[in-house]
Amino acid sequence: MAKFTIALSGLNNIDSPGPGVPVIRGIRDSKILDAKIIGLAYENLEPGAYMHDLVDKTYKVPYPSDGVETLLERLRYIHEKEKIDVLIPNFDSELFTFMKSEKVLQEMGINTFLPTLKQFEERHKSNLPEYGEKYGVKVPYSEPITSVQDFRDHMEKFELPVVVKGKFYDAFIAYDLDQLSMYFNKIASKWGLPIVIQEFVRGTEVNVVALGDGKGNTVGAVPMRKTYITDKGKAWGGITLEDPTMMELTDKIISQTQWRGGMELELIRTDKNELYLIEINPRLPAWVYLAVAAGQNLPEALVRLALGEEVQPFQGYATGKMFIRYSYDMITDLNEFEKLSTKGEL
Amino acid sequence: MLKIRKNIAISDSGFVFDPLSGESFALNPMGLEIIQLIKNGLTHQELSEAILGKYEVDGETFDRYFYDFIATLKQFNLLEEDTNG
């Protein structure tokens, strides 16, 4: 088995989990890759950093908001020690920085497999209506706003309730102006502006995890319905579906945009069986291990694509495969926490 | 003729899984028996005869419960669209 060093972020396996740990589980399950896993943590208490059976070594990294150079400087240091073959960023908020640095990373010998800047930008929540029109996909009506007054100015275009969404994360349903204003401030203080106001589409939330090869081909795709949703809107349980319409939509989006890398389509299926695209997340989601269990090891395929290998598309997956998330109190010693918080390495 | 959608999975214990919606349902033994008869391609007349011959129930009562059951199957999208009961 070929040995590779793979660095990745998103080790925050908390109630609103990052995809790092499930991506690692996929890589660990691989019969082709023998991986040394390097965790990149932003916070001292990201659980993945302490999961030594999954993560071999963890380094603290600066927030993307500290600037590209600071992050690259840290990555150079880590690369010098670890010789990273593949880097998988797992947060929406850091993707821009990594995409911008793709060439520099490649020169250093670090491979990535990320969407292009154009692909990343045009699927932004604030650009979704244009996206829907361009690619012939049904999307709910939405407007980016920078103040509550902005919404008042556009109010006639909406019917309450509406969905109030952050640039990167968070979404709340507002039933009146007071709630809208409250959520606006809550999200703006956390993720900045603009805030996106989206038409509320009633229906069942369904999702697809997919991987595009950058040439218009779908390497793999698995649809899922959330069977248990937390108050943060995250899936606490889910089940794989057999839905040709969702697969056709995924193929259409990937082939038309020549999508490169992992993605998650968030969709609403209405009572009339219409699919509305409400969001495209430009990375593998935290529930990606369900796809692995259903027969499509997308994290493994992503690593192989990053290494420049030809990857044959997956044929099928198991329907009715379920996941149930759980919480678990991991015990660790103070000296572990001390190492990560003082030396920035564990 | 009534037809159960072809990708609907029905276990021997009466557990029904719709892979399109991800929904699952539990049938009681009578519901399971009727669904199996529908799957075997029986017409309403044949199905009614089979049940009336086996259980102590009159035709009118059976029909009432039968159509109620079929309406539920339709409501949950478990029947083929062109099915007419």
Image (cartoon, rainbow, N blue to C red):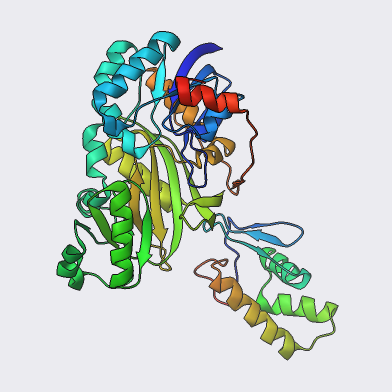
Up-down: is A212 above or below B64? above
Horizontal side, residue A171 vs residue A338: left or right: left
Depicted A67 relative to depicted A267: above or below:
above
The structure residue drawn at horizontal position 69% and vertical position 85%, both measured from the top left corner, is B63
Residue A29 appears anywhere in the view: no
Residue closer to the observer: A78 or A250: A78
> Residue A229: in sight, yes or no?
yes
Task: Say whether residue A152 is left or right of residue A289.
Answer: left
Q: For this view, does B82 lie left or right of residue A169?
A: right
Which of these two is toward me, A23 or A211? A23
Query: Looking at the image, which residue is at 33% across and 31% down?
Result: A63
Residue at (60, 49) in percent of width and height? A320
The front one of A160 and A147 is: A147
Quadrant of the rendered image containing residue A182:
bottom left
Query: Relative to residue B67, is residue B26 depicted above or below?
Result: above
Residue beneath the point at 73% across and 67% down: B32
Toward which corner of the image does residue B79 lie, by quadrant? Answer: bottom right
Percent x, y for residue A279?
34, 50
Residue at the limit of the structure toward the left, as seen here: A153
**Residue A223 placed where, x, y %?**
48, 47
Residue B60 position within the rendered picture, expressed as x and y whole percent measured from the top left: 72, 90
Figure quadrant of the N terminus of chain A: top right
- Residue B67 point in image, percent of width and height: 63, 81
- Closer to the camera, A332 or B81? A332
